[in-house]
Image (cartoon, helix red, strand yellow):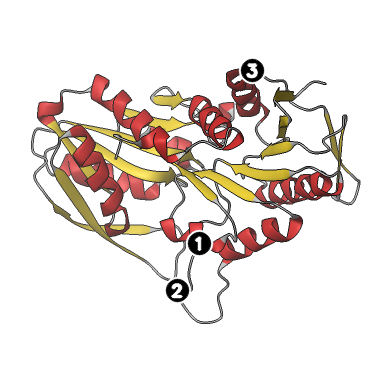
């Protein structure tokens, strides 16, 4: 049967939703399997239908779906796939969400707000998922929202190794675009052996996605600055950070982020900014209209495939990152 590899009595099944077929095809190639034939389409009223084209009874199933726009549609499709697998007697179902939707809503900032990241985890659990795999969750606490094993993969080694080859480390400064990313920037600083700078900012609580930069902590004069973050959404924070760095005498500015959400004006903002290169991974599909000359996309597929193989073989996903912290 296509899409299945066996080890003794165990069978690995890789299934893809419709959100990011290119990444799924890369992961399948890395694993040496074919994707399970799947019928998936929308009814006239927007409801989704899914059905697998071969038996999945007793299989160790991995359902890969990118939580990109329209995010609610693709999360729902993945939930239906999980439900279909459980009802078809799959032995174990792992949700592979390279970018975890609603991750930024991981706590209540004010009264009467939902904790949406927890709700998403609950929905996958209710649908029948036994395990969850994701790359660079917005906050580590999301791992505790799912009632089962969570494999939290890091893109830092992939991104940092690229940056190391790209720049002179003697002139490098790692920059956190806000206080919330300091821990991430510190990990980058340790890996690259570079000093750390922090941009202090305040958001306007009455205007979503708008940020005002206030001050820079650290020395960037004449240096190559690498702004690091887990995602780029509208690009406002990143571009303002780059402008602040150039205003403080930086020689060059690069950006490294795992998830290229690139909503709305992001591509145009980044294209017209002083940033010389934006380095991201392909956890999310990047349409042609969101691409620009200075964008570099690194493939996360080898990492995802190795993690899937470790889970299937009852190995250690943590071992993939030993020595990389």
Q: Which residue is mark 1?
A: 144
Q: Secondary structure at mark 3?
A: loop
Q: Which residue is mark 3?
A: 32
Residue 26 in the image: x percent, y percent? 60, 22
Sequence order check, earlier mark of 2 and 3: 3
Tell which residue pokes out farthest to the right in this image: 44
Q: Are marks 2 and 1 in contact (CB under 8 Å)?
A: no
Residue 231 in the image: x percent, y percent? 43, 45
**Front residue of 311 and 14:** 311
Report how far apart the C-alphas of labels 2 and 3 lie in the structure.
45 Å
> Would you identify the image quadrant in which residue 225 lies?
top left
Residue 52 in the image: x percent, y percent? 85, 34
Query: Residue 109 shows which numbered tag?
Result: 2
Looking at the image, is mark 2 or mark 3 nearer the viewer? 3
For the point 56% across and 57% down, which residue is it? 102
Q: Secondary structure at mark 2?
A: loop
Query: Residue 47 shows which numbered tag?
Result: none
| Residue 254 visible (yes or no) | yes
Quadrant of the frame with the N terminus: top right
Tell which residue pokes out farthest to the bottom in this image: 111
**Front residue of 45 and 106:** 106
| Residue 274 visible (yes or no) | no
Q: Are marks 3 and 1 in contact (CB under 8 Å)?
A: no
């Amino acid at each position: 049967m296509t899409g299945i590899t066996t080890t003794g009595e165990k069978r690995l099944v890789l299934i893809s939703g419709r959100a990011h077929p290119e990444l799924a095809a890369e992961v399948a190639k890395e694993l040496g399997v074919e994707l399970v034939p799947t019928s998936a389409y929308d009814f006239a009223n927007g409801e989704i239908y899914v059905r697998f084209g071969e038996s999945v009874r007793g299989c160790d199933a991995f359902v890969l779906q990118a939580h990109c726009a329209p995010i609610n549609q693709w999360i729902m499709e993945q939930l239906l796939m999980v439900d279909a697998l459980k009802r078809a007697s799959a032995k174990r179902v792992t949700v592979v969400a390279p970018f975890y939707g609603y991750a930024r809503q991981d706590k209540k900032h004010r009264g009467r707000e939902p904790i949406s990241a927890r709700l998403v985890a609950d929905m996958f659990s209710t649908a029948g998922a036994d395990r969850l795999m994701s790359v660079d969750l917005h906050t580590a606490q999301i791992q505790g929202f799912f009632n089962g094993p969570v494999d939290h993969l890091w893109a830092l080694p992939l991104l940092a190794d690229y940056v190391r080859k790209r720049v002179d480390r003697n002139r490098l400064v790692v920059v956190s675009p806000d206080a919330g990313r300091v821990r991430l920037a510190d990990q980058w600083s340790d890996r690259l052996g570079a000093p750390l700078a922090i941009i202090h900012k305040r958001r306007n609580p009455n205007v979503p996605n708008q940020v005002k930069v206030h001050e820079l902590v650290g020395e960037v004069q004449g240096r190559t600055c690498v702004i690091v973050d887990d995602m780029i959404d509208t690009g406002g924070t990143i571009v303002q950070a780059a402008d602040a760095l150039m205003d403080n005498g930086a020689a060059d500015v690069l950006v490294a982020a795992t998830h290229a959400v690139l909503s709305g004006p992001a591509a145009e903002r980044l294209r017209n900014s002083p940033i010389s290169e934006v380095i991201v991974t392909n956890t999310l599909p990047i349409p042609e209209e969101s691409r620009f000359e200075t964008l570099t996309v690194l493939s996360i597929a080898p990492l995802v495939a190795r993690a899937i193989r470790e889970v299937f073989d009852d190995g250690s996903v943590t071992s993939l990152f030993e020595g990389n912290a």
